[in-house]
Amino acid sequence: MELQTALTQTLYAQLLEEALSYEVLIFEDGVVGSPYVNISHEKRYLYWQVKLPDGTFRRKALGLETEETKVLVERLVERKRDIQSAIESLKTTTRSFVSSGGMSVELAHFRVMEWLARAGLFSKAIVVVGSHAFGALGNALGVRWGSSLKTTDMDFARPHGIALATPVSDVTLNVENVVKAGDDSFFAVPSLNIKFPATSLMSRKSKVKIDFLTTIRRKGDMSPIMFPDLGFAAEPLRYMDYLLGGPIVRGLLIGQYAIPANFPDPARFAIHKLIVAQERAAGFQTKVQKDVTQAMALVEALVEIGRDYELQEALAALPEYGYGKVAEKIRKSLTLTDSPAKCAVEVCLAKLTD
């Protein structure tokens, strides 16, 4: 872990401000498509034709061709140019940010994120977790990670009851159709229990895997939860309520340009990683080490920038979710690292158990 330069941190702040200001224009109220003329009974009717993320077309009738409808078409075309201009502006700032030392995601992953963002996924109280959250939180904290970013997985989470203080749009989408429109080699990964719906998608071409995760509905019920507004199901995981229950960080998914998204609180993310590392089966030791490495990198960053008090707050919140007895799991994970920052967690644990 190393601190990003002052220039990189300044460019991140500028990029975040730009991306948030353009968010509605590009992703929530953006105009895509083109004018379309239909001639019927020798009369010209104007439409605005939009290609949807699932590959189908939708035509919005504007009416009989008149001076008024021509003006409306021109306004739509102008708005489309505004969007393209906004994206070009974001691309320019993004290039400067990455060139100065900022972290970005692989192109194949960013393309999938872009498809989903344009379809409205990130307006559905989705929280990005996993390695992409780790990278994004590093940028938000003003630090740069080493080699712990490589991943083929893309993890999205949402509480089953939508308890986040985040507005949820009423747009309905079909996640599988959206990604298949961009890459037709995507397929729904069958669940081990054939009675359960799929909770993952994978591309045969790029090997990118998308996992949807959620909180447990009832104790002992690990059956996938269907989200009708996503057209897809999510897998309930233990401790996910703790991870998603803390403050939500507004940050960026950075590739060719920047997409605003929600991320977990970095301190809870670190503690969560230390806990789930001990939940993994014996055959997943590589993932265990990756969990611990990412957790300690976040701890080091929080200590370095003077926010180590957030670790104490994150640990103190565990009993609220019924996880007051996980201290031993955290201690076991700490034995797998020689990071000097583990002392910060050990001190916080000691205070918690006194």
Image (cartoon, grey):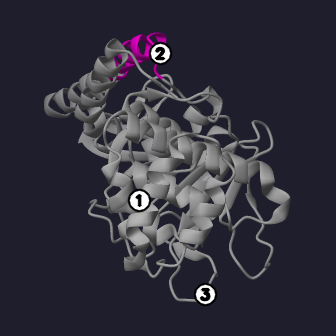
Disc 3 marks which amino acid?
Asp
Query: Vertically, is 268 above or below 185?
Result: below
The magenta-colored residue range is 85-102
**Relative depth, front residue between 261 and 237:** 237
Residue 49 visible, this orientation: no
Mark 1 Cα-neighbour bin, 10 Å: few <14, some 14–19, many ≥20: many
Based on the picture, tell me whether residue 195 belongs to the magenta stretch.
no
For marks 1 and 2, give the CA distance: 32 Å
Determine contact: label 2, label 3, CB under 8 Å: no
Q: Which residue is mark 3?
A: 221
Pinpoint residue 16: horizontal percent, then vertical percent: 30, 30
Which amino acid type is shown beneath numbered disc 1? Cys
Which residue carries the number 2 mark?
101
Question: In front here: 24 or 147?
Answer: 147
- In this image, 300 relative to 79: left or right? right
Residue ID at (52%, 88%): 218
The label number, if any, that marks residue 348 in the structure image? 1
